[in-house]
Image (spheres, rainbow, N blue to C red):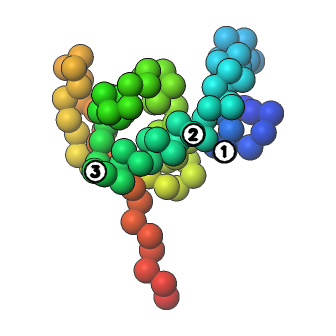
Amino acid sequence: MVMSDNEYPLFPGWKGGGGTSRQAADVIAPKAKTLRERVLAALERGDCTPEEVVAQTGVDIYSIRPRFSELKNMGIIRDSGKRRTSRGGLRSIVWTVRAEEPAP
């Protein structure tokens, strides 16, 4: 269960009883919105994996990867269904900006 003093996914959450995970959420909270905006800007230029956004922005993976979860939970991005091989040899999700639903 992800917990937060504020509303997740607008604010970083943590798992379990807190501890280190909660401390990390508290430290990143003031930067999370800006980092989500940077992830979204990268995705608007083209579908990306988190590792590819790290290469574009120079921000570390530990700060970037959770922003993907937040954006997904906000309904802003989605799994494109594609996979690309990461530097570590694993298949990574390629994320895309969720298309807006046409008006009825």
Q: Is residue 73 visible?
A: yes
Asked where in the image residue 19 lies, by quadrant, the reply is: top right
User: Which residue is situated farthest in the right direction here?
Assistant: 5
Marks 1 and 3, the one that precedes in the sequence = 1
Is residue 24 found left or right of 49 in the rendered image? right
Tell me which amino acid carries mark 1: Leu
Please state which amino acid type lies under the numbered disc 3: Gly
Looking at the image, which residue is at 52% across and 31% down?
Answer: 66
Q: Judging from the image, what secondary structure is the residue with disc 3 in?
A: loop
Q: Estimate how packed mark 3 is, as few (under 14), some (14 to 19) or many (20 or more) residues with alpha carbons within 10 Å.
A: few
What distance separates the C-alpha of mark 1 from that of mark 2? 11 Å
Q: Position of residue 72 (x, y in %)?
A: 49, 47
Mark closer to the observer (1, 2): 2
The disc at residue 34 is: 2
Q: CA distance from mark 1 to mark 3?
A: 23 Å
41 left or right of 74? left
22 relative to 42, above or below: above
Residue drawn at (70%, 16%) of the image: 23
User: What's under tag 2, amino acid-wise?
Assistant: Thr
Count of marks placed on residues: 3
Q: Nearer the viewer, residue 41 or 49?
A: 41
Where 72 falls versus 17 (above or below)?
A: below
Q: Which residue is mark 1?
A: 10
Number of the label disc, if any, that sits on residue 39: none
Q: Disc 3 to disc 2, how far (Cα)?
A: 19 Å
The secondary structure type at the circle numbered 1 is loop
Can residue 69 be seen by looking at this rendering? Answer: no
Q: Earlier in the sequence, mark 1 or mark 2?
A: 1
Residue position marked by numbered label 3 in the rendering:
46
Where residue 89 appears, as percent x and y from the top left, is 19, 20
